[in-house]
Image: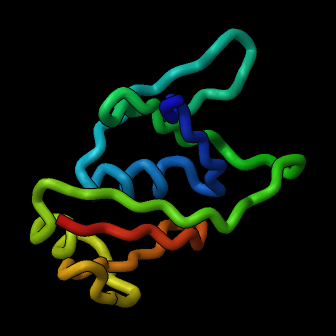
Amino acid sequence: MNLSLLVIRCKDLEASKNFYVALGLSFTKEQHGDGPEHFASEINGIVFELYPHNNNSLLDKSRLGFKVNNLGNVLSSVQVHSSYEYAGNTIYVLVDPDGRKVEVSA
């Protein structure tokens, strides 16, 4: 079994897109039928989508983690909340516009 899709709900879709673009993702605007416009990115065969939050959907407290190619560039583009060491690597914890903790490492 392989993960193929991850969808997160965002209060400010544009701010969230900009946050994840700073991590190195690129997005395409999509709309399926009468559904809401949203942004999609593909990462190693996994579709990562940012959907608008509406009053009927719950915001979650999911924690995401990404290994990024240009860690220095990412860290200069976003605010680091905290960091910790794990298996000899420094993991930097960021907070996205919806308050989710997002871990980045090289």
Decide which of 1, 84 is in the foreground and name it. Answer: 1
| Horizontal relation, residue 35 to residue 78: left or right | right
Decide which of 63, 14 is in the foreground and name it. Answer: 63
Decide which of 11, 96 is in the foreground and name it. Answer: 96
11 to 75, vertically: above or below: above
The residue shown at (25%, 79%) is 87
The residue shown at (40%, 61%) is 65
Q: Would you identify the image quadrant in which residue 31 lies?
A: top right
The residue shown at (58%, 73%) is 99
Q: Would you identify the image quadrant in which residue 92 lies?
A: bottom left
Q: Position of residue 84 (x, y in %)?
A: 33, 89
Q: Position of residue 6 (x, y in %)?
A: 55, 40
Decide which of 66, 41 is in the foreground and name it. Answer: 66
| Horizontal relation, residue 43 to residue 88: left or right | right
| Horizontal relation, residue 24 to residue 60: left or right | left
The residue shown at (17%, 65%) is 106
37 to 21, vertically: above or below: above
65 to 94, vertically: above or below: above
Q: Would you identify the image quadrant in which residue 105 lies?
A: bottom left
Residue closest to the far right: 56
Q: Count the marks: how many?
A: 0
18 to 48, vertically: above or below: below
